[in-house]
Structure formats: structure tokens, C-alpha cells
Image (cartoon, rainbow, N blue to C red):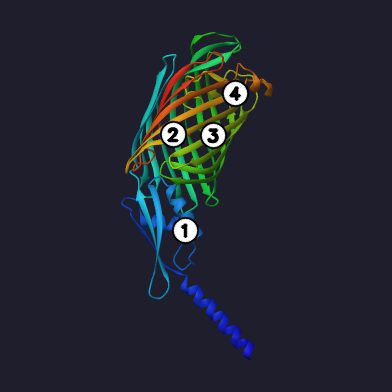
Amino acid sequence: MRSYAILFFFLLSLTGYSQDHLIADIKIQGTKKTKPVFLKRLVKMQAGMLLDSTLMQEDMERLKRLPSISHAYFQVFSSNDGRHNVFYNVEENFTIIPFANLFSSSNDDFAFRIGLQEFNFLGRNITLGGFYQHDVFNSYGANFRAPYLFGNRFGLEVNYKDLTTLEPVFFDNTAADYRYNNKGFEVLGLYELNFKNRVELGFSLFTEDYNYISGATNPAVPQNLMVDKHLFKFIYQYDNVAYHYQYLKGFRSSLNLQFVGSTDENLPEFVIGFNDFIYFKHIGQRGNWANRLRLGLASNMKTPFAPFTVDNNLNIRGVGNTIDRGTGAIVLNTEYRHTLIDKNWFVLQSNIFIDGGSWRNPGGDFGDFADDQNIRIYPGVGLRFIHKKIFNAIFRIDYGYGITKDASRGIVFGIGQYF
């Protein structure tokens, strides 16, 4: 009997101890536009759970990844009955953002994209936006992305585009200029496995239209093509990056796999895959070292319409607008960002970078990556003008100077960090 009494009081003491560490309520403070009920549904810590500082810190990182939140922190207050009230305090971003990307090179080609996006539509971190682009020709597009449309794990993304550009096509050591149009829509399902892992799965239907304008010709290279295509896409992202305003630290990996089907053998079906490995390190009080390694391969067809491009706005700053194509890519971008001015709302950041990469020629082999004709290395410098209270309000300007064979140089403007 005595042993049962000891067991009873032992269990009672455990129960009392647990109750003393239970959360009575979670309160969200600091919201203006974002719906508190949306944030409470998204975070993992809930009323009735045991107090867990590790889980609360994870919730802070989760909130800071949202477009509507620039910063978040928690406070814990004990009530008279020994339970705890937890306050999640957030600082909101302004989320209706105009944006512009401008890029030019020493070849005097110039292009820009302007648009408007709302990153917190209905106060639920839904992105809704559209853009106009001029790159010799006019283009348009619209996007809708709601990562938590169907609860705290499932979401949906829908995109429409009508892109028209002047595209160089390379063959027989020569090139021709084509008017290229890509018109279609894309639908993606979004699913969050857990805090660090998420997947996206979807498809798109689109039409590609090539029309010859000038340059070299070859009977084997069509001068006019209009092809209906379909695409299946799978994206897997691992994200373990911690955010503190403009400073980032941690590792992120994004895998993108696509199958592109075609109705014309001149633009045959192909498989393409690439992975971006991104690493950030906070150095001292004001420094940030950022790195991106992209490894990509596609079906190795000998075609002038190869999928990987060498371009100012995508991978090598200063190189020019679509100067080459390939069926494989290895690209490394590394840069050191240093904060020069840090005020309550404004940050001026300097940037020193090296962009380097190489491509596999269409129909070539892996030895092409070591060919000095395919290697580009562009060091450069830049500036970042950052508004700390507006989401992604980072105006960047970079100047890249090539040091490899037949190199160019140029200035690249844009909104947001380069990667």
C-alpha cells in the first residue's frame, strides 16, 4: 500500500510540474495588416502545450521568412496560477512594392522589367502581381502565390506570361538573331513538409515562337518555328537560413527538375535539372559572406536552342544579355557584403564579388567545362540601398569586369539581392 501511495504522489508532482509550465495563451502583437489568426495558425507553439524555447525560436524564424514580417521576437510572462502567457511580437513590412530590373552591357543593349506586387494580399501573405518588360520587344506577365491557401502546409501558385525577346541562336561558330516569344500559364501545388523542407509540383502549357531577323543562316536551322509544348516541374527546397534584417546565416538548397514535351522535332522534348547550393555567413558585426553554386544538366542534344544561357541578369554580372547557350552549367557566385550605414530604416551596403562559370556545348562532352572558350570569370563591385521596413526593398547596382578570353564589362541594376 505504501508503494502505491509513493507512486501516486510522484505522479501528482509530475502533473503539477507540467501544469506550471503550460502555456495559457499565445498573443500576437505588432500586426497592422497581417491577420493575427493567420499567424497563430502558422506557428507551431499553441496554448495548452508545454513551454519550449526551442520551438518558440523556430516560430520566430518561420515568421521572419514571411514577406510581411521584417523582424520577430517573443516574450514570456508568468500568471498567478503558475502558467505562462507568451507574446509573439512582430515588426511588419510594407508589402505593396513596385519593382524594376535594368541591365546593360558594353554592347549597348538595354532591357528593363517593371511591375507591382502585393506580398500580403488579404493579410495572409498571398503574393499577387504583374509586370511589363521591354527587351527590344514588349512582354507581360502575372503571378499568384499562396503558400498557405489550404491550411498551414498546402498552397497554390498560378503564373501567366507572354514574353518576347531578341534571342541569339548559336550554330557553326556563327550566330543569328531571332524574335522569340513564349506564351503560356503554369500551375504549381505547394506543400511544406516541415520547417526546413518544402516541395512544389506542377505543370505548364505554353507555345514557343521563333522568327528569324538577321545573321547567319543554315538549311538545317529553321527560320520560323511555332511549337506547342508542355512541362512538368518538381522543386525540392531545404532552407536552414536565419534572418536578421540584412544579415543572413545558414545553408539553403533548391533542386529543380523539369520534363519538357514538344510537338515538333526541331524543338525536341528534353529533361533539365539544376541545383542551387547557397551558403551565408555573418562575419563580425557588419559583414555578410554569400555564396551560390549552381550545377545543371539537360538532355545533350546538338541544337542551337539549348536551355542554359549565359546572361547578365541570371548568372554572370557584366557578361551581357544572353551571349551563349549550353546543355550543362557550372556557375559560382561569391560576394562579400559590408554594411556602411545602418539606420533605423535605411542601410547602405557595399559589395565585392566574383562571378564565374562554364558551360557544356550542345552535343558536347564534359570536357567542354574545362575549355577556355566556355569559361567566364567576372570580378566586380556594387552597392545596395536597403529599406528595412519594406519587403525586398533592395536596390542594387553592380559593375562586372571580365578577365577571361574575349570578355566584356557592364552594369547590372535590379531589385533584391542578386541571390
Disc 3 is placed on an element classified as strand
- Residue that numbered label 4 is attached to: 358
Among numbered discs 3 and 4, the one appearing first in the sequence: 3
Question: Does residue 138 lie above or below 51 as drawn?
Answer: above
Among numbered discs 1 and 3, the one appearing first in the sequence: 1
Among numbered discs 3 and 2, the one appearing first in the sequence: 2
Q: CA distance from mark 1 to mark 2?
A: 38 Å
Q: CA distance from mark 4 to mark 2?
A: 31 Å
Among numbered discs 4 and 2, the one appearing first in the sequence: 2
Q: Determine the image quadrant of residue 399.
A: top left
Residue contact at pointers 3 and 4, CB within 8 angstroms = no
**Which amino acid, by three-letter code, is at mark 1?**
Met
Question: Does residue 121 lie above or below 46 as drawn?
Answer: above
Q: Residue furthest bottom?
A: 1
Residue found 50% across the figure and 36% down from its top: 290
Disc 2 is placed on an element classified as strand
Disc 4 is placed on an element classified as strand
Q: Position of residue 247 (x, y in %)?
A: 44, 42
- Residue that numbered label 3 is attached to: 292
- Residue that numbered label 1 is attached to: 56
Q: CA distance from mark 3 to mark 4?
A: 14 Å
Question: Does residue 374 lie above or below 87 as drawn?
Answer: above
Density class for disc 3 (Cα within 10 Å; few <14, some 14-19, many ≥20) is many
Which of these two is toward me, 208 or 89? 89
